[in-house]
Image (tube, rainbow, N blue to C red):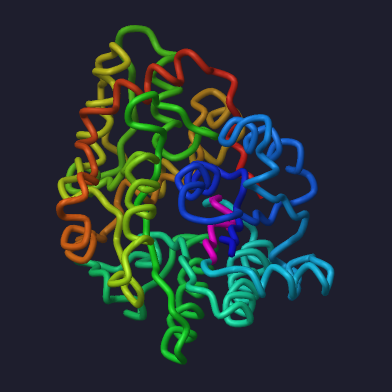
Amino acid sequence: MSVFLTGFPGFLGSALVGRLLDRTDRIDCLVQSKYRDDAARRAAELAGDDWEADIALHEGDITDPRLGLSEETYDRLAGDAEEAFHFAAVYDLGVEADLAERVNVDGTRHVLDFAEAADARLHHVSTCYVSGRYDGVFTEEMLREGQSFTNHYEETKFRAEVAVRERMAEGLSATIYRPAITVGDSRTGETQKYDGPYHVIRYLLRQPRVAVLFTPLGASDTELNVVPRDYVVDAIDALSRMDRSAGVTYNLCDPHPPTAVEAQRVLAEAAGRRVVSVPTTQSLLERLLSAGPVRAATGFDPAVVPYYTHPTRYVAPNARRDLSGTGVSPPPFAAYAPALVEFVREHPDISSAAMT
């Protein structure tokens, strides 16, 4: 029997593959052709020179109804799979609507069809930001709350989770995992791309001892919910092994997140910089950062600005309950921020581009 996984060699999916090696005969990874060589290198890092005995790479595409596989391969994988882990998505705040729809929504429906054909338990990786700009506390049971969305990424991840919940209501065995903003490893700082909080880190490291940061009004009251990759992967690994997690949604978030202003201060301390914060309006800051010269000079993406005034707070009673006793819990942001900064300092050339 095997485990089927999409999103390899992506940031989270590739990390989980190493944890799955002890629980299945084979891991069948759906890989886009352009990432085939990267996937082979990553598989060798995880399983050694004889990796093909444990990990099979299948070139395909979730936007195709048959996942870009031949009929024979599709049927064989569906006949073998006991579990399916769906990581593949466009993780890009500025993604265009059509691409987000094809990958995040249509792609999820195609993976749902595969899971049903395989009679496999599905593990679907969503995001806390299916909340959109819901004003208040967003629980693990909540989903369709009439919320508005900041971008096509949020909206299509929401619609993908709606599709998963509809199939669950029809009898599909599935678990939903909603990570908060996910950054690098809490111990090594290792990450695959620089986005989100990394715009702040890279800007700080380019400044002298004092760094001026324009901060939207309200940022001092806005929670910035960040978790490291190892927590997300550890949590998915632990929860996916539990029978009782079937049918459950988990917010994988920081129970005590810093505010956006506090997070900037912590990163500045880790970078050895002092921050001078200049209050401004969200709309003015977005306009400034949309100008080519300003964006080039600062490195900030205007798509991140709305998250400085994000009105949603996240709670995770399901995750806290079911991870109790496993030793898996999110570390405080201040504890691993220095590792994030040091990794960027030592690896300045990693791209901010999304793996699509």
Q: Is residue 128 above or below residue 42?
A: below
Q: Nearer the viewer, residue 90 or 76?
A: 76
**Outermost residue, bottom side:** 170
Task: Residue 44: name its quadrant.
Answer: top right
Left or right of 94 on screen, residue 132? left
The structure residue drawn at horizontal position 63% and vertical position 45%, both measured from the top left corner, is: 355
Left or right of 333 on screen, residue 49? right
Task: Residue 241: name its quadrant.
Answer: bottom left
In the image, is residue 205 part of the stretch drawn in magenta? Answer: no
Question: Is the magenta region chiefly helix, strand or loop?
Answer: loop
Residue 29 locus on image (x, y percent): 65, 54
The structure residue drawn at horizontal position 59% and vertical position 30%, both measured from the top left corner, is: 45
Q: Nearer the viewer, residue 78 or 232?
A: 78
Left or right of 241 on screen, residue 138? left
Q: How many marks?
A: 0
Residue 321 locus on image (x, y percent): 16, 62
Q: Nearer the viewer, residue 145 or 192?
A: 192
Residue 37 locus on image (x, y percent): 76, 37
What segment carries the magenta color?
84-92
Q: Nearer the viewer, residue 190 or 137?
A: 190
